[in-house]
Image (tube, grey):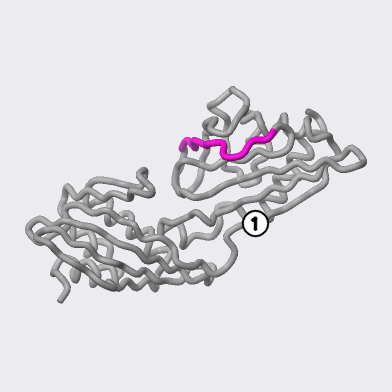
Amino acid sequence: MLPQALQSLRDAINSHVPERIADCFTEDYVAERPLRPAEGFIGSGEVAANWTKILTGLPDLRVEILRHAQNGDESWSEWEYRGTAPTGATVLLRGPVILTTHDGRIAWARFYPDPVTIEGPTHSTVSQVLDAPAGRIFAVLRDPRRHPELDATGRLRHAETSERIDAVGDIFVMAAHSEEFGDHRIENRVVAFTENRLIGWAPGQRPFGHRFTWKLTPTDDGRTEVTYAYDWAAVTHPADLARPPVVTADELDASLTRLAGAVSVA
């Protein structure tokens, strides 16, 4: 038989009522995601907000507890989350959840569920041949101050970092605006860098798990083939899995066109 706290949480999630889900937790509840530390939080109020987002993206979400074990106030359980994203893709996560209870409510939990399969693409790639040498193009890409010129989504406002990108591990910060987050800052970590050939970065805020990479390949006639790749295979948060990609293929291609314009006057 399931412990009451686990049964109440499972039934609350399957009811699709965020307030009922939040009622399963203590007011000072502590949530930890060891694989995504920045997604941890404190307070049952955050539970309702998080589940509102998740259920908006996965309106048919169902969860099951596959197995469990309990020792006093501590429970170990394996969960399965299954739903359908707006794109029609199936979202399936499985993994363990460790929690403790106080007076029948969950007071602390560590979440490890990860995607099992994601039907549909997890990356998008576009290419154009630009009438400019690789060095000139790379000079624009490595300068965060030029990035708003290339942004076809309209979200980037300006760079808060003036230094150029020089190596893997560098951090640069962009001011941005979106309907969901309003004015905010995006801290990007450089994950790929080869002078005049390859540059890529991953945003350090939600939605986590996205990576953008530019590859430059010189052609025999002095031009450069630029391949712009966007990968979201590392996205694991249920609320983010339910969303469409944050940048469309058309927007990627439009960014390449903007880059062509930028290097023509660079």
**Looking at the rendering, which quadrant does residue 119 occupy?**
bottom right
Q: Is residue 13 above or below residue 240?
A: below
Q: Is residue 193 magenta?
A: yes
| Residue 39, position as x, y percentages in the image | 35, 47
Q: Is residue 16 above or below residue 74?
A: below
Q: Residue at x 84, y 36 (%)?
A: 132
Callout 1 secondary element: strand
Q: Provide the residue designation for mark 1.
A: 124
| Residue 218, position as x, y percentages in the image | 83, 40
Q: Is residue 92 left or right of residue 158?
A: left
| Residue kind at label 1, given as amino acid type | Ser
Q: Quadrant of the N terminus?
A: bottom left
Find the residue positioned furthest to the top: 163
| Residue 127, position as x, y percentages in the image | 76, 51
Q: Residue at x 66, y 50 (%)?
A: 229
Which span is picked out in magenta?
A: 184-194
The dominant secondary structure in magenta is strand
